[in-house]
Amino acid sequence: MRENASHPVQPPISSAARSLAAGGLVTALLASGALVTSELASARLPGCGAGSDCTRLSEGPWGTVPVIGLPISLVGFAYFAAAAAWWWTPGPRTAGRSGRVIVRLAAAWSLVLIAVMVAQRAWCPYCALSHAGNLLFAVAVEMTARRAATGAPAASRPRPLLRALATGVLVLLGLSGAWIFKTRADADASRQALTTSTDRIIAAPTHTTGFRGRYITGPANARSRIVVFTDFQCPQCRALETELLDLVKSRDDTSLSIKHFPLCSACNPAVPTSIHPRACDAAVAAGAAGAVGGADAFWQAASWIFGRSGSFESSEFLDAAAGWGLNRAELERRLHDAATLEIVKADVKEGLPLEITRAPTVFINGVELQGWETPGAVRHAVEAIAAAPSPAPTDAPADAPADAQTRAIDQWFRASPVDIPPRPAAAPALKDDVGVRVILFGDYQDGFSAEADAIIRAYVQTWPGTRYEFRHFPASSSCNPRLTINPHPLACRMARAAESARLLGGDLAFTSVHEWLFEHRQDFSDAGLRQLATSLGIDGTVLVAASKDARVQAALQADIDAGNALGISAIPAIYIDGRPLAVWKTQSAGEHITKVLDLAAQQRDQPPPSQPDPRPPLQPPPATAPPAEPPR
């Protein structure tokens, strides 16, 4: 009796509370883990691409910690890790008063962020799942508290709580360190891109005609002619427009004009769903003002529209425009005139062949300015252009952006070679003394990997001097732990099947299974694999069983580790002579792989006279510095 009096027995936790807590914590950890992966690995989550609601929420004031800018998703994941450590600590699971207060505060914060999503009409499924899991966990904690109230008084659990707090702090410190490292790396890459593109702008011929928007502010014969593809519902576009207008006002050698690229399906065929549903209407309103009142009216309307984040009623706009001295009746007619919308569509149509995928996209003198996200980047570029000697007069055509394929090839040409670790001895890597080297990191369930692989293999058959190596990078968390999502659940099994074939039958067997796996990426089965193995003279049962062989596992893991070390965030990832081919295919120009392979071949030794090169000569893109040597 004395023992019971000094150590009150708590009622056992109910199965309902246990299930709610476990389900809530697992859901919250997985969903917030996906957001953390997106932040730290620049991985694009399904439904959360550029300009999406997820991106808008994460980049908004509710998506980051004030002052330091740390993503809220990192804080959320650290809290859920701490909650899991607290809940699953051995011992009675009745929540003490301090633990319940923390859980209630976290639940209240989830409710606030849910209200923000509703108020902003922004839907982020991963955020919603995180908050739902958090609320389920809070309900489970309250259930344990009420159950404890019917028995002995709930005992405080200071040690588990302190252990949980320590877990949360350590996880948050680790994630914060990774975020700081990534932020600095991104800033360095942005500055390098800014320097490179600025040098290209300076080296380009200068003109006073060519690539322009419809309404220009600044001198007509400017040395720096800035053109921005913009979206009136894009926060970055709004901030950039303010910066650029201040720049133009402070200089007499810079002009600015706008081209429309709304992320809205009503006027942009490249956007399947409207990320910014009012962006087309906003562009039409600015265009109508320009048609009625000229350039001054356009820019006045643009500032007004940006000030309202591109969302407003027509009556509000007409009232405001009346204060600018515009004829209300004429403006209203222009707002409803199909010709005004066609002007917006014309800008979009001009941007599509340039592979414009986001707004803003900045051009100076017809050359894309990369790295404009760096603070003060455009001003820095304009000042560098002004300080450079003026180019000599030229008879070259007026400035215009390069087409998508030219830009993709140029990007590869200027990229620095990377070191790709060799594979295990069972699958030797390419040697340095061969011809053009192509490495593709792909996934047997991925249709784009299948397409790129077929292009490269066809090229190799036409031009045997090319050496091709396929590396595994399955988009499946079952063997690729860096991923928190599992879009291709069979990819790991299929990769192991290919390596098993290589182990049992050599490169010829690997090639046959490799091709078969891509052909059967939608209907893969062990039965089909066994049948294929029999046709290759391999015991099908042995082939399937060999997937557990340590050598097969090592070969697959070596590829995954190499891909993660390279920071691969999308497949297929293609490297030609060590340089990444960031864009291998575009809607307007098709695939770029064969063009780059031709260029890479001509950078190496020419074929002997007995084997004349049947391909037309290619000229490398003009470089401001000698191209990097292939890796040795």
Image (cartoon, rainbow, N blue to C red):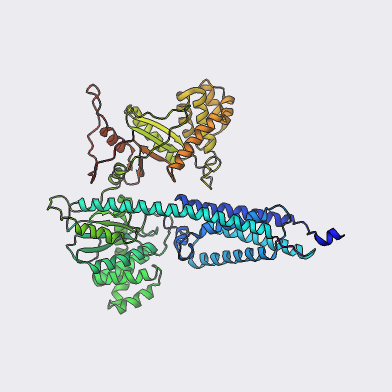
Q: Residue shown at 17%/52% (left/top)?
A: 205
When asked about the image quadrant of residue 32, the answer is bottom right
Extreme-top residue of the structure:
537
Q: Is the magenta stretch mostly helix, strand or loop?
A: loop
Instruction: State left or right for residue 278 relative to residue 90.
Output: left
Which of the pair 34/342 is nearer the observer? 34
Residue 353, given in percent of the width and then of the height, sits at 30, 50
Q: Residue furthest right?
A: 1
- Place of residue 430 in the rendered image (x, y in percent of width and height, measured from the top left): 39, 29
Find residue 197 and report its horizontal and vertical position in percent: 27, 52
Q: Is residue 137 visible?
A: yes
Q: Quadrant of the N terminus?
A: bottom right
Q: Quick one: quadrant of the C terminus? A: top left
> Residue 454 at x, y = what percent?
40, 34
510 horizontally vs 396: left or right: right
Magenta segment includes 196? no
Residue 229, located in which quarter of the rendered image?
bottom left
What segment carries the magenta color? 153-157
**164 relative position to 342: left or right:** right
Which residue shows up at 32% across the image and 40% down it? 592
